Amino acid sequence: MIERSISYREAARQLVRQMIAEQASPVSLLSSTLNSTADGILVINAEGKVILFNERFLDLWRIPLELLALRDDQRLLDHVMQQLVEPEVFIKKVVELYATPHAESFDTLYFVDGRVFERYSCPQEIDRAIIGRVWSFRDITRQVQAEREREQLRTTMIETQQAALRELSTPLIPVARGVLIMPLIGTIDDERASEIMEALLDGVALHRAHTVILDITGVQVVDTQVANSFIQAARAVQLLGAQVMLTGIQPQIAQTLVHLGVDLGMLTTRATLQDGVAAVLR
C-alpha cells in the first residue's frame, strides 16, 4: 500500500511538471520563432505602447539596448526617424494607420545610408477584437541594388545600341585627303537630320575636310523639310571652311523638289556618287 502511495505521488508530480512545461512551451516557441525570422517584428498595443519585438527588429533599426531600456516611445521614434530619407512620410503613414485600426499597409522605406526596407502593417486581433498593431520590416537593400545595377546595365546597352545605330545611320567615310562621303539610306526625320548635322560638323573638324559628299541614292523621299535640313547642314559646314556636294538625286525626287520650289542653289550636285567623287578628285 505504501509503495502504491509513493508511485501515485511521483506520477502526480510528473503530471504537474508536464502541465507546467506545456504551459511554458508556447511562449518559448513563440520567442524562438520570432527570433528566427528574417523580418523585424514590432507589436504595439492599443495604447501605442511597445509590447513585443524580436532581435531582428533591433538589428534592422540599429536600436541600442540602453535606449530600449528607457522605454521612452518618443525617443525610440526619434531614433528611427532620423535614419530615414523622408521621415515626415513615415510618421504620416503611422498616424493614418492608427486612425484607421482595420487598415493594412505595405510600402517602402528609404534610408539616408542607402538601405531600403519593405514595411508591412496589419491590425492585431483576438476573437475579432483589435488589440494592437503588428509591424513587419524586411531589408531589401541587396535586391534593390541588384535591380538598379540591372537597370543601369540595360540603359548602358540601349545607349550603346543607339550610338551604334546612329553611326550606321550617319556613316562618314574618308575617301581621300580632305574628302568625306556620307551615304544616307532610309527615312530622314528631324532627329536624324540633327544627327546628320552633328556628324558632318564633327567629321569636318576631325578630318580637316574641305568637301563632304552627301549621297542620297538610298533616300526614297525628300520633302521640303529634308531639303532644308541639307541646306542648313551645308551652311554649317561652310562656316568650318568646307563645302557640301549632294549626289544621287533620283528623277522623282528632283521633280518633287522643283514642284515644292526648294532652292538647292547653294549646293553643288552630281547625278551619282561616282560622278561626285570624280569631280572632287579632279
Image (cartoon, grey):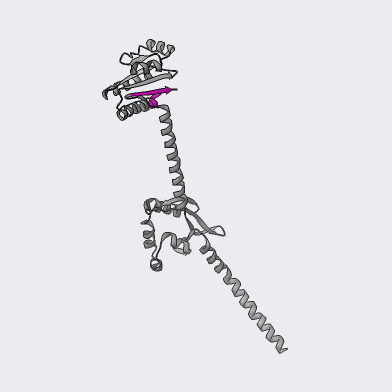
Q: Nearer the viewer, residue 104 or 279?
A: 279
Q: Residue at x 68, y 86 (%)?
A: 6
Residue 32 position (above or below residue 280): below
Assign the C terminus to one quadrant of the image.
Answer: top left
Please tell me which residue lies in front, 205 or 254: 205
63 or 278: nearer the eye?
A: 278
In the picture, residue 273 is in which quadrant? Answer: top left
- The residue at 67%/80% (across/down) is 11
- Asked if residue 122 lies in the magenta stretch, the reply is no
Tell me the quarter of the picture where residue 237 sits: top left
What is the span of residues highlighted in magenta in the rendered image? Answer: 179-193
- Res 224 seen here: no
The spot of residue 214 in percent (x, y) is 37, 21
Q: Whole-percent x and y of residue 267?
A: 32, 16
Q: Would you say 26 lies left or right of 191 here?
A: right
Q: In the image, is 176 to the left or to the right of 154?
A: left
Q: Position of residue 208 (x, y in %)?
A: 29, 27
